[in-house]
Image (cartoon, rainbow, N blue to C red):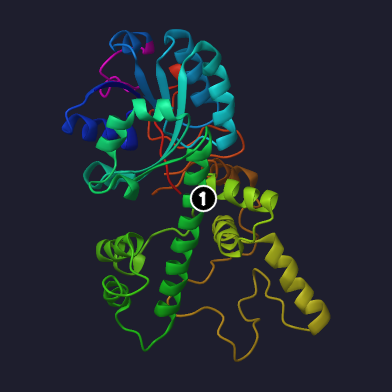
Amino acid sequence: MKIGMIGLGKMGGNMRARLRAAGHEVVGFDLDESLRDVSSLEELVGALEAPRVVWVMVPHGRPTRATVEQLGDLLEEGDLVIEGGNSKFTEDVELDAILSPRGIGYVDCGVSGGIWGRENGYGLMCGGRAEHVELAMPIFDALRPEGPREEGFVHAGEVGAGHYAKMVHNGIEYGLMHAYAEGYELLTAKDIVTDVKGCFQAWSRGTVVRSWLLDLLVKALDERPGLENVSGYTSDSGEGRWTVEEAIEMAVPMPVISAALFSRFASRQENSPAMQAVAALRGQFGGHAVKLLDDAASKDEGQVEVHRGAEPKHDDGERPGADETEAAPDAADADQAGPSSGSGSTGGQAGPTSGSGETGEHAERSGTDA
């Protein structure tokens, strides 16, 4: 089968390679001239035969919308667009409304697998009309892991259902990652535990907490024992936020996923105004010592303040982040995607990208995870 691929970053590029290895012909476009096969979307569409199938892997929001609008002008009735980035499910309905009146199909496809998908295959969650999903099934079968189709692919429902399923998947991922992370910290805090990595490795076969995420944590501890020099600053893709928003809208209790998301927010603050207020209140009603930034002596006697595996805060007499010129880079970083399982910006900004950072022709490359 012949397919067009727009966006050839870590995900899109690896997907192109996996498809080609399976015998499919892929015509790719990217802003990076060293990666692309054609120099424009017009050339990409011209290289395909009807019914044309074009897979879009660019950041969610404006870049994706602009790309789909341009494809709507270039493709013909009977063709198909697959949106495989991190679009919000509500955006899928809007994009389908652009293409449907022209007779062009639209399928939203959540993709999980990160940088390992090229070798292991990708978990795929699709939304759309049955005839459009069926048209692209040879592509889905090539991308998913080997084995039964239902263990790596699902037609989750109508337009938007694929990205909705991927959103919930990433929300679950937040909770799983944070549970492992809390366990890691408790193990490092206890002096009788001398082989923290070994504990996690011992859980990797035969226990109920075994998982690929656990294997990846063991790998991370192999590569950097003690996680030396790894910053705790953790970004989010936006999908965790959307999951919590949906939980509120649907009255579904999600304390674990919500807490994991809020912990990522906390990781970006050198000094929390909320916790400053808590400390001040403890001093007011209970007479507890209030530690000032220039006072290293004040603490509650007999209480462990910071465990041996953690590094105490380095307060230097004024609240970190108070200087706006120093805070600006962090504010910018907060809009960028974190790794994984990729991530992207929120609040209407361009989503995850490993591309050149340009917005011309809207073909930045998309990540797809948390």
Q: Nearer the viewer, residue 284 or 131?
A: 131
Please say whether residue 143 is one of the residues in the magenta stretch: no
Which span of residues is magenta-colored? 28-41
At numbered mark 1, what does the secondary structure look like: helix, strand or loop?
Answer: helix
Residue 323 horizontal side relative to residue 39, left or right? right
User: How far from the left and from the top, in percent, is residue 139?
Assistant: 29, 31
- Above or below, 60 against 73 in this view is below
Which residue sits at x=37%, y=71%? 209
Q: Is residue 7 visible?
A: no
Which residue sits at x=24%, y=41%? 118
Q: Mark 1: which amino acid?
A: Val
Quadrant placement of the N terminus = top left
User: How far from the left and from the top, in percent, is residue 356?
Assistant: 38, 28
- Above or below, 201 against 129 in this view is below
Which residue sits at x=59%, y=87%? 303
User: How far from the left and from the top, in percent, is residue 229?
Assistant: 37, 61
Please state the total of marks drawn on the protein image. 1
Q: Which residue is mark 1?
A: 168
Q: Is residue 370 visible?
A: yes
Please say whether residue 33 is one of the residues in the magenta stretch: yes
